[in-house]
Amino acid sequence: MSQNTTLQTEELFKKIISHSKEYGFIYPSSEIYDGLSAVYDYGAYGAELKNNIRAYWWQAMTYLHQNIVGIDAAIFMHPTTWKASGHVDAFNDPLIDNKDSKKRYRADVLIEEHITKLQEKINKEIEKARKRFENFDENLFRSTNPRVKEIQEKIQQIEERFKNALEKNDLQEIKQIILDCEIACPISGTRNWTDVRQFNLMFATQLGSVADEANTIYLRPETAQGIFVNFLNVQKTARMKIPFGIAQTGKAFRNEIVARQFIFRMREFEQMEMQYFVKPGTEMEWYEYWKEARLKWHKALGFSNDYYRFKDHVKLAHYANAACDIEFKFPFGFKELEGIHSRTDFDLSNHEKYSGKKLQYFDVEENRRYVPYVIETSVGLDRLFLAILSAGYKEELVENETRTVLSIPAALAPVKAAVLPLVKKDGMPEIAQKLWEELKYLGKIIYEDKDTIGRRYRRQDAIGTPYCITIDNETLQNETVTIRERDTMQQERIHISKVYSYIEEKTSIKNLLRKL
């Protein structure tokens, strides 16, 4: 029997970061030069996991829908693209410094975290009452308990002030909210704040050999614009009819002033985005459709429903008429995992304006041209990677020893199976090598013959390998092997000729896709 060892959230996060480096998932970039802030490299197993996550997203988007196709647009784009998209003028973060600690924070995040703490107080009051009363009615308790009502009213007041300040870009009011809420710097513990200032997040560089302003271009801060400028190219060449989608994965770059929490917020990251083009007036219907479809995609990974929730945006972006996030419960709290936005016709209309080229769809059925509206789904690949590690990392007591295991969905696991000869003699290594040759077409398969079989099991548990195949004395007698399952540690014997089909069935991405 195994027993879960409960980890505190801060301790858990530190363990995940340490585990990621020790077992070849993630390293600090340029580590021999003391690293580069908020930039990371993916190791042998990290690269495999990342590729598998990307494949799951790509196949779910482009294989399961007849009307969604993919592209791969360039990172460099004409600089006017970013003027048309609004990034040159509006892609800013409100930042504030603490004069005592010299630390810089996103002002909006400070306020949001304060609201979260207030909400946690309400949750504690509810849990106390739930334990005291047998027939507990949460809605009644929320509406009648003076303490809870007081906190709820405070949250509503802060949210209303915050929303108004963001809409008016009133930086002084944002600072005043921080002061009125008595929000202190986590490092210094003081409330000695500077004024709030806006910082543009785009990286600028020069195209060609002459470094002047005319040749300034940007590293793309999002992948979406590559889709919008190719809208008509794709629609015509792929013969697409409204509604249809264009999907893309790729690197994006943001000069995050406040980058923290490991790979959650980085300066170089990867996005998986799909822009869905619809008839004007139908956008809210499709917005609701993609909200539910994307949540279902995440839940197909098999983690508890408690890890997910929707959160509507307090302030809508300049291009949106509706927006929400799918938030995931990371060790440091609920944070954005994926955004779903109704972008209206802002992007295509602005690219029409700045380029002088028509970006309209001719609707044969209605015999008219129009600029489509767009529903966007955008998920951070690196954040999803961290979510999978966070939900999958476990420490269990097994026979008075701690077993560390990554319970990664088998279809996404960096190593699909490990082939392990019990000993390095009696022909077992030769049989194991032959089996490895057969299985290698299914994905990353490990052959290992060093250390005791128990230690090899533990090493595979730690990197998330779902199945270990052991060649032993009985294999020599009747050609059967032992297959050990990672999470349950249960073992079964099957004939060696059936191993290929067994591993193929258990580790295929099709298992996830069939849930959608």
Image (cartoon, helix red, strand yellow):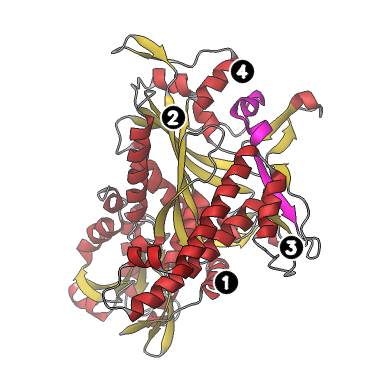
Q: Is residue 92 magenta?
A: yes
Q: Which residue is mark 1?
A: 14
**Residue 322 image position (x, y, % from top left):** 45, 37
| Tag 3 residue | 34
Q: Residue at x 68, y 32 (%)?
A: 89
**Distance (Cα) linking label 3 and label 4:** 44 Å
Residue corresponding to mark 2: 374
Please identify, in this view, whether the residue under mark 3 or under mark 4 is nearer the observer.
Answer: 4
From mark 3 to mark 2, how far is it between C-alphas?
43 Å
287 inside magenta stretch: no
Quadrant of res 137: bottom left
Asked whether 509 or 148 is in front, the reply is 148
- Furthest toward the top, the residue is 367
Front residue of 142 and 371: 142
Name which residue lies at 53% across and 40% down: 250
**Mark 2 touches mark 4? (CB < 8 Å):** no
Q: Identify the residue position indicated by label 4 in the image.
A: 354
Q: Amino acid at mark 3?
A: Asp
Of badges 3 and 2, nearer the viewer stands 2
Q: Is residue 273 above or below residue 429?
A: above
**Regarding mark 3 in the picture, which secondary structure is present there?**
loop
Q: In the rendered view, does 39 fall on the left or right side of 402?
A: right
